[in-house]
C-alpha cells in the first residue's frame, strides 16, 4: 500500500500543502521551500504509528519550532492511501490533528479519524474523553484509555485480545503499514560510527533510517537465505571462484589465524604511513602508476605557486 495523497497544514514551512506522489518522485526547490520538511512530516507520521509521537516532538524542541511560522494553532496531516491492490475493503483514509496547548510547547491529539473512504469508521476520536475503535470500547486498547499525546492507532496490537474482530485486525494492519515508513539520511561512516563497530549477532531484516545497522541486516539476510549459493552458474564465466563472505571472521582475524598456522607467529600491523613512503622507490611507483608522476608534479607546482 502506497501513499495516494498527503495533505499537510501548519507544519514548519508547510502552511497548506497537498502532495500526490507517484512510484518515484524527485523533489526540487530552492533552500527553505520545504523539501526537508516534507520528509520530516513522513517521519512524524511514522512516529505517530509507532507510539513515539511525544518523543519525536520533544526531540524537535516542542510544538513551537514545528508549527508554521511558530503561530499556527495546530498541525494536521491527512493521508489517503492506494488500496487498489487489496482484495477487500481496508482502512485507507487517515486524518490527525495535533493541537497546541495554549502558549506552551505541549500538545494533545485533538482529532483522529480512520475510515475506508466510504462508510466504515475504524477510529473516531475527538479530544480525550471520546474515542471509539470501530464501535469497540477503548478498554480494548488500554484500561487507562488512550494517551492525549499518542494516537489511538499506535495502541492497537493483535495481542490485546484472543479473538479480535476483522475490523480491529484491519486497523492493526494499517498501523503496521504506517510504522514501516522510513526516511534514510546520510550514512555516517566516520571512525567512531556504529557501522564500524564489531557487529553484534542479532536478527534484523530492516535497515534503520541512519543505516548504522546495515552490516547486521546483511548478516541476517546472508545467513537466513543461502539460495544464491546454488546459483553460481549465473556468475560470468570469467569469475572462477565467487567470493563467499564470512562475517564471523573479519580480515584482521583471518590474517592472524593464517599467520599463526603458516608462519607460526602472530600478525600485527608493522608499517606506518611515514615509514612506508620513506621506503618507497619512486621509479617503481611511476612504472606501476604512470599517472602518479603527473599528479605529483602538479601538486609540487601548486605548492610552489602558493609559496609553500
Image: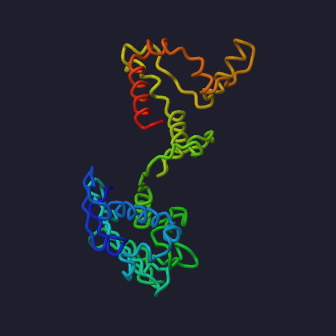
Q: Picture quarter containing residue 183?
A: bottom left
- State the residue at coordinates (71%, 12%): 263
Q: Residue furthest front?
A: 307
Pick the quarter of the image with the N terminus.
bottom left
Front residue of 26/141: it is: 26
Q: Picture quarter containing residue 27?
A: bottom left
Please state the horizontal and vertical placement of residue 146, each as a whole percent of the image: 51, 77
Front residue of 299/195: it is: 299
Is 122 positioned to the left or the right of 266 in the image? left
Please state the horizontal and vertical placement of residue 98, each as a whole percent of the image: 42, 77
Front residue of 243/60: it is: 60
Is 291 positioned to the left or the right of 101 in the image? left
Please state the horizontal and vertical placement of residue 86, each as a whole percent of the image: 30, 55
Please state the horizontal and vertical placement of residue 56, each as a whole percent of the image: 50, 67
Q: How is the image coloured?
A: rainbow
Q: Residue furthest bottom?
A: 102
| In the rendered image, the vertical position of residue 72 relative to residue 156, given as above or below | below
Front residue of 193/261: it is: 193
| In the rendered image, the vertical position of residue 5 relative to residue 151, given as above or below | above
Is 125 positioned to the left or the right of 119 in the image? right
| In the rendered image, the vertical position of residue 190 relative to residue 46, given as above or below | above
| In the rendered image, the vertical position of residue 221 relative to residue 96, given as above or below | above
Count the marks: 0
Amino acid at each position: 500500500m502506497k501513499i495516494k495523497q498527503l495533505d499537510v497544514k501548519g507544519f514548519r514551512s508547510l502552511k497548506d500543502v497537498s502532495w500526490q506522489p507517484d512510484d518515484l518522485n524527485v523533489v526540487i526547490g530552492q533552500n527553505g521551500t520545504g523539501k526537508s520538511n516534507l520528509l520530516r512530516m513522513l517521519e512524524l507520521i511514522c512516529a505517530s504509528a509507532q507510539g513515539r509521537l511525544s518523543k519525536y516532538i520533544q526531540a524537535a524542541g516542542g510544538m513551537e519550532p514545528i508549527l508554521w511560522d511558530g503561530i499556527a494553532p495546530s498541525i494536521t496531516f491527512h493521508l489517503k492511501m492506494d488500496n487498489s491492490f487489496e482484495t477487500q475493503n481496508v482502512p485507507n483514509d487517515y486524518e490527525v490533528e495535533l493541537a497546541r496547548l495554549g502558549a506552551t510547547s505541549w500538545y494533545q491529539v485533538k482529532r483522529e479519524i480512520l475510515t475506508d473512504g466510504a462508510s466504515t469508521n475504524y477510529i473516531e476520536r475527538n479530544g480525550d474523553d471520546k474515542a471509539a475503535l470501530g464501535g469497540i470500547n477503548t478498554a480494548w486498547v488500554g484500561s487507562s484509555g488512550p494517551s492525549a499525546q499518542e494516537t489511538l492507532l499506535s495502541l492497537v496490537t493483535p495481542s490485546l485480545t484472543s479473538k479480535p474482530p476483522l475490523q480491529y485486525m484491519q486497523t492493526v494492519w494499517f498501523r503496521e503499514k504506517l510504522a514501516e515508513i522510513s526516511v534514510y539520511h546520510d550514512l555516517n561512516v566516520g571512525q567512531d560510527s556504529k557501522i564500524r563497530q564489531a557487529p553484534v549477532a542479532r536478527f534484523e531484516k530492516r535497515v534503520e533510517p541512519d543505516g548504522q545497522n546495515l552490516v547486521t541486516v546483511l548478516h541476517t539476510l546472508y545467513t537466513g537465505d543461502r539460495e544464491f549459493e546454488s546459483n553460481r552458474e549465473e556468475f560470468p564465466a570469467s569469475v572462477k571462484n565467487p567470493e563467499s563472505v564470512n562475517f564471523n571472521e573479519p580480515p584482521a582475524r583471518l590474517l592472524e589465524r593464517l599467520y599463526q598456522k603458516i608462519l607460526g607467529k602472530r600478525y600485527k600491523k608493522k608499517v606506518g604511513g611515514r615509514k612506508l613512503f620513506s621506503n618507497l622507490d619512486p621509479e617503481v611507483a611511476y612504472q606501476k602508476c604512470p599517472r602518479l608522476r603527473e599528479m605529483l608534479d602538479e601538486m609540487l607546482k601548486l605548492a610552489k605557486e602558493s609559496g609553500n
